[in-house]
Amino acid sequence: MSTPNFAVSAIALAVLQMTSSAARAEDPDQTMQEVVVSAAKTRATTASVAGFANAPLLETPASVSVLTSQQMLDLQIRSTTDAARYDASLSDAYNAVGYAEQFSIRGFNLDNESSYRKDGMAITGDTQIPLENKERLEVLKGLSGLQAGVSAPGGIINYVIKRPTDTPLRTVVLEERERGNLYGAVDLGGRFDNTDFGYRINAAAERLRSYIKGADGNRKFVSAAFDWRISPQALLQIDADYQRKSQVTAPGYQLLNNLTLPNVPADQLLNDQPWSRPVETTSSNVGARFEYKFSPDWNATISANQHNFKRDDYTAFPYGCGAQDLYPGFCGNGDYDVYNYISLGEKKSPLTAQALLQGRFATGTIKHDFTGGASFFKNSEKWGDYLYDLSGVSNIYHPVVVAPAPGTSGPVSERRRDNERALFAQDIVSLNEQLKLHAGARYVKLKRDEYVGVDDDGAVLPYAHTDIGFWLPNVALVYNVRSNVATYVSYAQGLEHGGVAPMGTENEHRALEPSKSKQVEVGIKADIRQDLSASVALFQIRKGLEYTDAANYYVRNGEAQNRGLEVALNGRASRDLTVGVSATALNTKQSGTGSAELDGKRVTDVAAFKSSVYADYAVPQVQGLKVGANWQYSGKKAFDAANSVFVPSYHVVNLTGSYATRIGNIGTTFRAGIDNVFDKFYWRDVTPELGGYLMPGALRTFRISATFDL
C-alpha cells in the first residue's frame, strides 16, 4: 500500500469514528453527556524508568526527565530527535538523517542493543522509534545497572506504551512541514460493550522530505494495545506494533586536508548519486504483561516483549581523499572518494522477559517497600559481508556523477548471539518519616558467542565465547527536608557490553569484553508548587576508555571520567506561563592510555555547557491562543580525540503558536512553528565514528498542524 493511500485510509477510519459519534450526539433519543473541560497537567510527576514501578519523581534518587504524549502533541514532536532539543543532557551521536536515531546522555553514547526500552524491555535502536503509540518518553540519566542490567553508562530511554482509555478517544493529527513533508495520524481508544475489554489503536503515515535536498522517503506505522480485566485482582495487557521506513540517508562531512572545517550549505546531500537507494528498515514488537494483586500490599507481574528488526543498507558513502592519501579527510579542494556501500538482510531479534514480586511490609516501626525478580534477555544478530568498494571521486562544491562499483553484500548468517539472565532485589526502607534507604543489587550472567571469521580454506573458525557474571549494587539515601523538598546521595555500578570495532579497524566487527562503570551522584528536588518542579544533580561517572589505537585496533585502555551538573525547572510558573529549563555543565577527561594525544583531552562531540529554555504563554486576551519559544545553546565541541579541531558553539531559536477552538462538535487545535528562526548554520553532530564526520543542523523550517478531538 502506498504512503498516500495508507494515510487516507487511516484518516478515513478516524473520521468515520468521529462522524458516527457526532450522529449519536445529535440523536434526540440519546442523552447528551456532560462535558467537563479542565487544564491538562503541564509536566509529569511520576516515572517508571528509575525503578520497577511508577514512582513520584520527587522521591526518586536519580535524575529523570519525562515528556508526556500531550507535551509531544503540543510541541509537535514527531521523533526522539525532536524531543532531544528540550533536554540538555541528551545529545546527538552519529544521528544521520535517514538512518538510525542515535544519542548520548551525560557524554556517553547509548548502546543500540540495550539503552532503548519499551516498557522496560530492551528494543533495538537502529531505526527511528515511533512515538505515535507512546504515552511517555522517559530518560534516566546515569547508570541503570539495577534497573536494566546491561546498558551504556550514560543512561536509558524508556518508551511507555499508550494503553486503552476508560472513555472514548478519537484524535486525528494532520501536519505539513516545509519542503513537502506530510504527516497524518490517528489515535483511537476506549472500551468495548463488555467494559472488561479495552483497546487503543494508533496509525500514522509520513511522506519524508528532509531539510537535506534528496534525503527523501516515507514511513508507515500501525499499533494496537488491548487489555482484559480478568477480575478485580488480575489484568492482562497485550500490544503489538509494526513500522516500515524507507529513506535516503545523508552522510556527514570530513575535514578538508583533515585540518579545517568545510564551508558548505546545510541542505547538500553527499549521497546524491543516480544509483543511490533508500535505507529500508522494518521493525516490530509483540508484548504481553500480566499483573495479579494478592492483596492491597502485594502483587506479581510477568511481562515479555519480542522485537524484530531488519535493514537493507545502501549508501554512496563519502570517505577520504585518495589523491592526498588522506584516510580520513577530504581533499583541500573539496574532492572526496565515493564508495558503494551495500549491506542487505541485517537482522536483530531481541527477546526480553521479566517477573516481579512487589510488596509492602513492616518490621517493627520500620517500613519496607520490596521488589524482587528475575529477567531474561537473548538476541541474535545476523548480517553478511558488506560491499564497500571505491566508485570514484566527487566534490563538495561541484558534485560529480560516478559509476557504482559492481557487486552486492554476501550471504547472511548469524554473527553474534547474546544471552543474559539476571536476579535482582531492592528494598526501600523508611527509617523514619524523613529518611529512606534505597538498597538493591542485580546479579547478571552474560553469555556471548561471536563470529571471528574463516581459515585459509574457507572453513568457519570456532566462535569466540564469553561466559561471565557480574554483581551490580545500587544504594541511595533520600532525605525529605520538607514534604515538597527531597535531597539524595547515591552510588551505583553499571554494566555494558564492550564496544564493537568499527569498519576499517584491524579487528572490525569484533566486540570487546563486558565492562563495569561506577557513578556517584548527589541531588535535590523540589515541587515548588503542584505544577512546578525544580531539580539539581551533581554526578561523576567513570568507565574504561574505548578507542582505536595507533596500530589501528579498537581497544579498551585507560579511563573516561565525566563529571557534571544538571539543572532543570519544569511546569507552570503562573496561570498563563509554562516554562521548561534544562542545563548541563560537563567536564570530560581521558586518562591512563599512555598516549599524549588522548590523556587529559576532552571527549569528542561533547559540549562543556549545553542548555535549552522553553516558554509557552497563554494570551489572556484571546481564549485558546498560545505562543511559545525555545532557545537552545551548545558550547564548542572537539572534533577529534587529540582536540586539534573544535567546532564553534551555537544558538538556535524556535518559535511556536497554537489556537484551540471548536468546529461544530469537534475540538480543534491549530499549531504552527518555525524551527531555527534566524536560519543559522551550525554543526549539530560531530561524531568520531568511522573516521569522524560533521553533520549540519536543519535550516529554517516552517510547520503547521491541526489536531481534531471528539
Image (cartoon, rainbow, N blue to C red):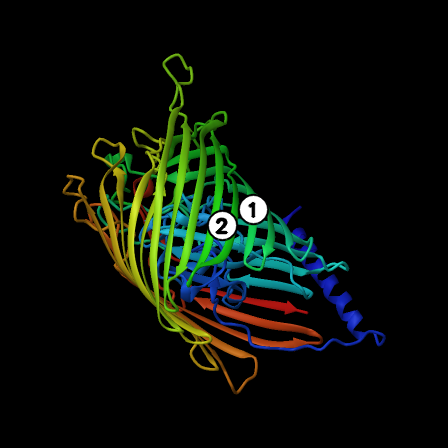
232 displayed left or right of 52: right
Q: Residue at position x 48%, y 35% from top?
A: 379
User: What x and y, as percent, mark residue 255?
Assistant: 27, 46
Q: Crowdedness of circle 1 by 10 Å Cα count: few (<14), some, many (20+)?
A: many
Q: Residue furthest top?
A: 457
SS label for mark 2: loop
Q: Residue at position x 16%, y 40% from top?
A: 595
Q: On the image, numbered disc 1 is attached to which residue?
A: 303
* Numbered-mark total: 2
199 displayed left or right of 143: right
Quarter location, residue 23:
bottom right
Q: Residue furthest bottom?
A: 621
Residue type, label 2: Gly
The reply to whether residue 684 is visible in this rendering is no
156 displayed left or right of 683: right
Q: On the image, numbered disc 2 is attached to which residue?
A: 120
Q: Residue furthest front?
A: 364
Q: On the rendered image, what quadrant is the C terminus found in?
A: bottom right
Q: Which mark is residue 248?
A: none
User: What x and y, as percent, mark residue 156?
Assistant: 41, 51
Q: Nearer the viewer, residue 562 or 394?
A: 562
- How far is mark 2 from mark 1, CA to CA? 9 Å
The answer to the question of whether label 2 and label 1 lie on touching residues, with beta carbons closer than 8 A, is yes
Q: Residue at position x 26%, y 42% from top?
A: 544
The reply to whether residue 159 is visible in this rendering is yes
SS label for mark 1: strand
Residue type, label 1: Ser
The answer to whether 689 is drawn above or below residue 164 in the figure is above
Q: Crowdedness of circle 2 by 10 Å Cα count: few (<14), some, many (20+)?
A: many
